[in-house]
Amino acid sequence: MSQSREERKAAWEKVSQAAFAQIDRPEEEMLKETFSEIEAVVLEEARKLGLELLRTRLELDPRSRTDREFACTGCQKPLRVQEPQQVRRLETVLGEVEYRRPYGVCDRCGLSYAPLDGGLGIPVSGGSVGRTQRVCHAAVTGRSFETAAEILREHDGIELSAKQVRILSESEGQRVVEEWRAEVEAFRRRELSFAGPEAVELLVVTADGGRVQTRQRQEGSAWREDKVGGVYDAIPRKDSAAASADHYEGAKAGTKTYVASLSTWEEFGWMLCVEAWRRGYERAKQKLFISDGAVALRTLRQAHFPDALFILDWYHATEHLADAAKAAFAEDMEAYRAWYQTLKDHLWQGDVEAILGALQKESGRVGPPGPKEADSSPRVVLHRNQGYFADNREGINYPKFRAEGWPIGSGIAEGAVKQFGMRLKGTEKFWNGFGFGLGADEMLALCALHRSEDNRWREHWDRRSRAYVRTPK
């Protein structure tokens, strides 16, 4: 039975007195205690007091009264109270709290719910939102679910197994994935628009790919490509002297936000497009797209960001030159270094024709690739790099890019790929994979949400905490 306010007050006073008694010790005992011991006692008593406060607040809520009438949130007709004092045990950040509340059914709409839970924003199943937030934070910042369970136990006093942490965090990640998909669908139907601040001076979109290991093998491999995209604002530092400078830093990134997925490049392109528009892409005074020149990224850019100026990521470009140098002079390190440095100088000056000429010369020397030659063959490497630099020539005008004060590297996306990889990659980490249920895609979504710098993580949990209304399916 529900207790009266006086009874709850008496219960609260009893718990408070018991807590105070734990620190109001005889002098001889006080002289033997350390501060750490006192601190541990206080924390435990604070937890007990907190649980009692939660119980009291739930007990006193008007929506817990058995004599109250409730309206169905679907048809607004009276809700038939099926269980006047249904018991629920809810896991919270302080521990488990048990409370009673009316549980009703609408025979017309088929709805069944507890008005108290909806009014307070308590999820239909699982623990409190605050507890789930802590679990997810440990899951994305720890290197594994086992580590996350240790963090929760040590820092929050939450006892969960690694499997329980995984279920809770991946379930929340699935919620984020579904929200992204809903936004993409609405955006594609032209039903989604974003109101934002004044136009930024420069908005940069960048993307890259990594790899995660799954339990499903496709084409003989268990590895899947994860896609990571970043969007950030920047203030360009225009300087004509930078065009001929030997050293360059470029514009510093402002607020960075991310999307990440195991979906196809086509689907991921829409996700990145929505994120760019959310950040004010349409209103930006200058738009850049910085990435490697791979075919998938080039297709994504042409489909979703055709009006953005393309910059071929400097570091990827130099890696391609290094691969070509190794293919041409694998047995002669001195010639390798000299040829690579010469082409790198041409690249810095944006001299695509000189690079293509050198690649063509070495490709002619080693000969054309055969029809079934391995990708690692020197002939294949040199041949493909000719196409690589020819196809991406528009993004190699580095002197102009430096003079404008623009960034020339996609380090924001590459850094995120590495950070997410630290969480998702490892010899003992095998994921279910996209399309096979909860797994890597959901954790990528949580990682991107957490790493974004626009308070998105906090806003997600604020939305999850709001009161909700049950409606017919």
Image: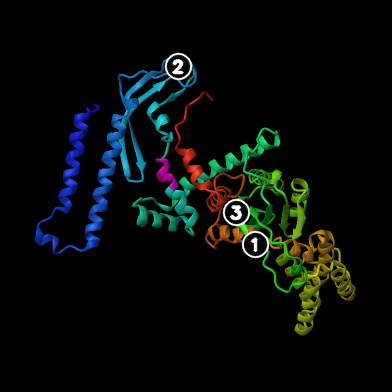
Q: Main secondary structure of the magenta part?
A: helix
Residue 239 is left or right of residue 42, and the answer is right
Query: Which residue sits at x=17%, y=51%?
Result: 22
Q: Locate the N terminus and report the quarter of the image it occupies.
A: top left
Asked whether residue 202 is drawn in magenta, I would say no
Q: Which of the pair 6/75 is nearer the observer?
A: 6
| Residue type of the residue flagged with mark 3 | Lys
Secondary structure category for the residue under label 1: helix
Among the two numbered marks 1 and 2 on one chain, the one whose residue lies closer to the N terminus: 2
Give amino acid for label 2: Asp
Amino acid type indicated by mark 1: Gly
Choose mark 1 or mark 2, whichever is in front.
Answer: 1
Give the image location of residue 273, x and y in percent.
Answer: 69, 45
Most foreground residue, 310 or 56: 310
**Stretch in magenta:** 128-133
Q: CA distance from mark 1 to mark 2?
A: 58 Å
Q: Is label 3 or label 2 in front? A: 3
Q: Are marks 1 and 2 in contact (CB under 8 Å)?
A: no
Q: Where is mark 1, residue-wise? A: 411
Q: Is residue 403 above or below residue 122?
A: below
**Helix, strand or loop at mark 2:** loop
Residue 463: image x %, image y %? 49, 38
Q: CA distance from mark 3 to mark 2?
A: 49 Å
x, y (%) of residue 272? 67, 47
Q: Which residue is mark 3?
A: 256
Q: Which mark is residue 107?
A: 2
